[in-house]
């Protein structure tokens, strides 16, 4: 399970970095979203990848990650998802305003013309 999560995080980071380095602002926005998803998946996996475990320590069991799943990373990821959606919506509004004002969605404002 850890190998699958690690590969998924690596693929998301690689695709996100590649898209962030693209010259268009929409591609950069998608790349930032992929990096955000990779970070959320990483934080979620840090909390423990236990299946069928209680999120709270039960009486009589040792308080370690073998017997329960830490709920803090789950709450952090949920908060990060909400903030990520809000940031993406704000960036889309700025992107549309830039497209309307500059007639270009190129990152540096100068498109290569043939």
Image (cartoon, grey):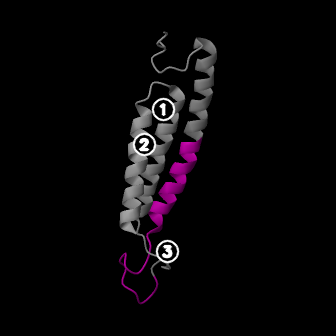
Where disc 3 sits, the SS reads loop
Query: How far apart are the two marked residues, 2 and 3, measured between alpha carbons?
Result: 32 Å
Residue interval drawn in magenta: 58-85
- Which residue is located at x 40 percent, y 81 percent? 67
Q: Is residue 16 above or below residue 90?
A: below
Q: How crowded is mark 3: few (under 14 residues within 10 Å), some or many (20 or more)?
A: some
Q: Which of marks 3 and 1 is nearer the N terminus?
A: 1
Q: Position of residue 36 (x, y in %)?
A: 47, 45
Q: Earlier in the sequence, mark 2 or mark 1?
A: 2
Residue annotated with mark 2: 15
Numbered badge on residue 28 = 1
Density class for disc 2 (Cα within 10 Å; few <14, some 14-19, many ≥20) is some
Q: Position of residue 29 (x, y in %)?
A: 51, 34
Residue in front for this viewpoint, 34 or 88: 34
Q: Position of residue 10 (x, y in %)?
A: 37, 51
Depth check: give the residue in front, 56 or 33.
33
Residue positioned most to the top: 114
Quadrant in which residue 4 is drawn: bottom left
In front: label 2 or label 3: 2
Q: Is residue 113 above or below residue 29?
A: above
The answer to whether the residues at label 2 and label 3 have Cβ atoms under 8 Å apart is: no
**Could you tell me how far apart the alpha carbons at marks 3 and 1 are, in whole angstroms?**
37 Å
Can you identify the residue that label 3 sits on? 55
């Amino acid at each position: 399970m850890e190998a699958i999560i690690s590969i998924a995080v690596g693929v998301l980071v690689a695709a996100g970095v590649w898209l962030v380095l693209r010259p268009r602002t929409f591609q950069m926005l998608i790349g930032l979203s992929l990096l955000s998803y990779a970070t959320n998946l990483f934080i979620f996996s840090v909390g423990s990848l236990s299946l069928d475990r209680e999120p709270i320590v039960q009486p009589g069991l040792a308080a370690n990650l073998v017997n329960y799943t830490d709920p803090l990373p789950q709450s952090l990821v949920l908060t990060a998802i909400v903030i990520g959606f809000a940031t993406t919506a704000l960036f889309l509004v700025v992107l549309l305003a830039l497209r309307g004002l500059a007639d270009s969605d190129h990152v540096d404002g100068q498109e290569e013309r043939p």
